Image (spheres, grey):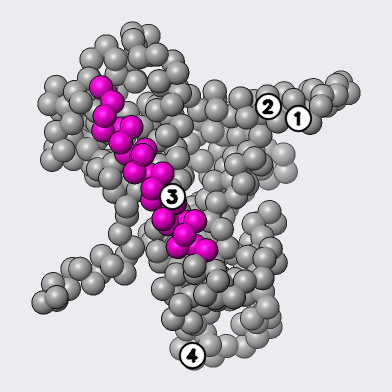
Amino acid sequence: MYFITLEIFYVTEYPEFYEYRIGQETLKQVKRYKGFSKEKMQWAVARALFSMRGIGWNTCQKHLKHHGTIKKQGKWEWIFEMILFEIVLKFSFGILTIDLFLNSSYMKGAGWDRNAFDLYSQSFQSIWYQFLFLAMSGFGVYCGISILYYLNAIPLVALGVYQVSDFPPIFGSLFAATTVRDFWSKFWHQLLYKPCAPLAIKLSHLVTKEKFWNRLVSVYLTFIITGIIHAIGTSFLDWNGPLDYNPNIPSWVPPQITILGTTWHIGRYFYSFIFFPYQAVLITIETIVIELWESYGFGIPKSLAKIIGFTWVFLSQYMLGNCYIDEMVKGGIRLEEVITPEPPLFHFIKNLNLPI
């Protein structure tokens, strides 16, 4: 919420001068809403809480289709489909993912020895096991985010607070992720797009006005800001405290830095940050390669291009992806909660301590 607020007040100081919901209002109408009127309050709440990806708004990224333009569905048909496919099935597959984690030698105490995933030069884990670990980890996160999204969406649609069209699929098609750029822009969720991208674009204009370099800098800044958000989250983990996956893990890991006499154990959240700027580097590399390939007029069958693309995306995430997961596990993340998250509404009700 901090970054969303920062985006609202720093990047778009008067969003009502620029943003409106497609099909519900026009920009002219938004500008005419009186302060603290019902219409203005509804617009403001929707803008702050339900437009992180810009779905249904004029600011939406072009490839993020509004659900209503893809498939017309009745409310209860949509709810049944989401419960079955997006919650029950993904929960079931997620449980298998958890089982893989908890029954691996890594989770049973080998997390800080010569088999540690972040010590590649000395790793005795088979490369296929490490590939599987990365793939299942990513799938677990994918399931967890999807389940949380629809657990919040279904009650709101059932109660008539929002329409089916307000909750399009949170993830795109994995088959569209043939480059690292497409993986993040066309497949993965865009929940951090609104708080990160506009801020990065704003800052990039302070660095350079030249169009090419401005766009390049904004890509790097977007991933840097995203990395900061994830690193902040990881920094709050108890570092193996309550879970005791591996009592041999030391209280800190390199690297660490000392600023004005204060030591920061950045090893606890180093990969949570660096994993994201690394994506900008990969995007730069693949863009150069693609541009050179096309400039020389080389041709390649589409099916082969997709195979090469999928292979590139997966291999490029292999090392730092496993390091990131390794860091999260050592930090003490409860893996069960990755798959079975509690919707904020349920969490709020539980904290009321009602006699039920």
User: Can residue 58 be seen from the camera position used here?
Assistant: no
Residue 274, position as x, y percentages in the image: 43, 31
Numbered label attached to residue 307: 2
Asked if marks 1 and 2 touch (Cβ < 8 Å), the reply is: yes
Mark 2 or 4: the one toward you: 2
CA neighbours of label 1 inside 10 A, class few (<14), some (14 to 19), many (20+)? few
First in sequence, mark 3 or 1: give its number.
3
The stretch in magenta equals 81-106
Above or below, 105 against 269 in this view is above
Mark 3 or 1: the one toward you: 3
Amino acid under disc 1:
Ser
Identify the residue at horizontal 54%, vertical 23% (top origin): 315
Classify mark 2: helix, strand or loop. helix
Residue annotated with mark 4: 38
The residues tagged by marks 1 and 4 sit, at their Cα atoms, a distance apart of: 53 Å
Amino acid under disc 4:
Lys
Numbered label attached to residue 303: 1
Q: Where's the N terminus, which quadrant?
A: bottom left
Above or below, 196 against 270 in this view is below
351 relative to 297 in the view: left or right: left
In the foreground, 261 or 118 = 118
Residue annotated with mark 3: 90
